[in-house]
Image (tube, coloured by chain):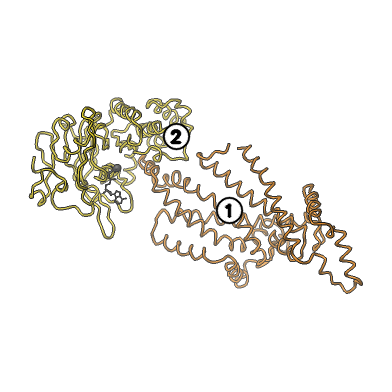
Amino acid sequence: MAEPLLAIKDLKTYFISKDMEVRAVDGIDINVNERQIVCIVGESGCGKSMTSLSIMRLVPQPRGKIVGGEVKFAGRDLLKLTEKQMTDVRGNDISMIFQEPMTALNPVLTIGEQITEVLLRHRNLTKREAMAKAVEMLQFVGVPRAAEIVHEYPHQLSGGLRQRVMIAMAMVCEPKLLIADEPTTALDVTIQAQVLELMKKMRNDFNTAIILITHDLGVVADMADHVVVMYAGQVVESVNADDLFAAPLHPYTKALMESIPSLEEEKETLYSIPGTVPDAAAYPVGCRFADRCPIKQPSCYESMPLLREVKPGHLVRCDLV
Amino acid sequence: MGTYITRRLLGMIPMLFFITVAVFLMMHAAPGNAFNSIMNPAIKDPQALIASLEAQNFLNKPLWWQYFHWIGLFVTGNWGFSFAQHAPVIDLVGPAIQNTLILSVMAEIITLAIGIPLGVLQSRKPYSGFDYTTSVVSFILFSVPYFIFAILLIYLFAIHLRIFPAQGAVGTGPNAGSLLDHIYHALLPALSISLVSLAFYSRNTRGSMLEVSRKDYVRTAYAKGLMEGKVFSKHVLRNALIPLITFFGLDIGNLVGGAVILEGLFSYQGMGLLTISAVNNRDYNVIMATTIIFAVAVLLGNLLADILYAVVDPRIRYN
Ligand SMILES: Nc1ncnc2c1ncn2[C@@H]1O[C@H](COP(=O)(O)OP(=O)(O)OP(=O)(O)O)[C@@H](O)[C@H]1O
Ligand SMILES: [Mg+2]
């Protein structure tokens, strides 16, 4: 099998302060192949955003630290690059888009300035050439009046348009990997579908692999080739999308699936997983899901289950399956 | 924008009217007038002379009549005569404005040129040794009133080291009155005003920079591959300066207040000194002229700040 484009091994990102250590990402393994769309799902606080910021080496300073592991991208360990080398990767080989397109764009710079900035940083272009390329990219992502919009400011655009601008900005250097951290959460449903469609188009036309972070399993079903389920800073299940929806194995994944409202059944109340996620500053020694698990055994509290390949290509962190 | 500015300028007229009425009334409510102090033994009947001077200058007319008489002349450019200095008010105000302008512009330049870069440097390495020491110094500077600095600076540079003049706005000798001579004389009073406000600016710049560095769009800028220096100069600094414009607008008022106190201390012949002596001598026409000039300066300062807002922040538009 070919080398994956991105291979994350045992990545650990902690927030370290005098009296505590928050283990936001606690030994993650994720592989992303070329052209693959990998969805990362999991409850709020499980470490999805910190995983993606760790890949970019943009963990919030000064307390956030990548304390261990490896992030191999196209053969190089990103964690070993100098900061200068890393800036050459960002925006060029790997791009990122964020949840809030309103706050992710600079309010005092025009759309054109913000897009050309990436090109001027990574490509040997004149300002005029960069501007032409920016307009072209905006047209490509379906922004109407692109030639005028480059002279406008973010506040003059709707939320959906802003997210398109973000995508144009992220894709303008045709990166090999796009990381999208809940790109549609802030948008209303019809716009959501359009933005997701656009991301698929990006994958198809630019051969860009995508890491899509979401907690919407509907989005996962629509988009994912491969799914990584995270819980409390760890991967608990990792498998291709079809197998996941056909037969989820980890009790947490099953619980997540049950919490999706289904149209046929019209359930009165939304199922939600009882109990709470353990505190990231004080994880137990055993399985982190044990307290909330419907099939737990006393042995679950004794040692941490390993991420095992229970079927070919299907990894699960549970000793009971 | 043009119509907005015109509207704001027109809006100043009623404000100036109220300000001048208030000052006019207060001025006349204070006991005495410019002629009461005539005490020349050669004059046989001072009372008769005072009465005739008062009549000549309409001081025995009703107050409302005097006000409208004054304003009628004022708007036509006739600012009257200084009773105390025996010169047309225009001739006194001209050089005084020039001196105060030099002092204020210098103070503002020192403040901005040191305060903002200092705050930026502090914010680049927050909680470092440099940040702590400069912050402590800022707090000390900020909590000391500026006449204390004035006295310290006069003592150190004028009396002890003898490298700067302690008094006056211009010197004597061949270069007297040149721009350099003006700057040389304005330096100590300008520094006295600046030390307080540059401490204020550096604190606020630092806070504003730190706040903006946490914004999502700064993370976006890093995610594009921009170098740290570029992120700070292009994305953080521009946004961080926006809230400082409010202070810049208020500075003109502060400089006016500073001028009144510091020009007195440094015997610096500016608007502040002119106002103080006019008030002491009940020199009505001078008081009214300086009042209007100060009021216009403060109002223009506010207008300038509002215009600057629209220039740097595209979200603000006046229509
Ligand atoms: N600046 C910070 N300082 C300390 N802890 C932090 C900081 N940012 C995040 N964390 C912690 O790191 C953990 C993972 O956060 P992360 O933002 O990756 O969660 P997430 O999975 O993206 O959640 P969400 O779905 O809400 O976006 C959380 O427990 C959070 O409390
Ligand atoms: Mg998140």
Left or right: residue B227 compared with residue A205: right
Figure quadrant of the N terminus of chain A: top left
Q: Count neighbours of disc 2 (C-alpha within 10 A) and say few if under 14, some if 14 to 19, many if 20 or more.
A: many
Q: Residue at x 76, y 65 (%)?
A: B281
**Would you identify the image quadrant in which residue A70 lies?**
top left
| Chain B representation colour | orange
Count numbered badges in the picture.
2
The CA span between labels 2 and 1 is 33 Å
Give me the chain that's yellow. Answer: A
Which residue does the numbered mark 1 point to in the structure image?
Answer: B250
**In front here: B94 or B32?**
B32
Three-letter amino acid code at the position of disc 1: Leu
Marker disc for residue A111: 2
**Would you identify the image quadrant in which residue A86 lies?**
top left
**In front here: A55 or B288?**
B288
Q: Nearer the viewer, mark 2 or mark 1?
A: 1
List x then y, in percent, for residue A311.
Answer: 9, 34
Describe the element under mark 1 as helix, strand or loop.
Answer: helix
List x then y, in percent, for residue A217.
Answer: 24, 34
* Disc 1: host chain: B
**In front here: B144 or A251?**
A251
Three-letter amino acid code at the position of disc 2: Ile
**Would you identify the image quadrant in which residue B9 lies?**
top right
- The single residue placed furthest to the front in the displayed view is A268
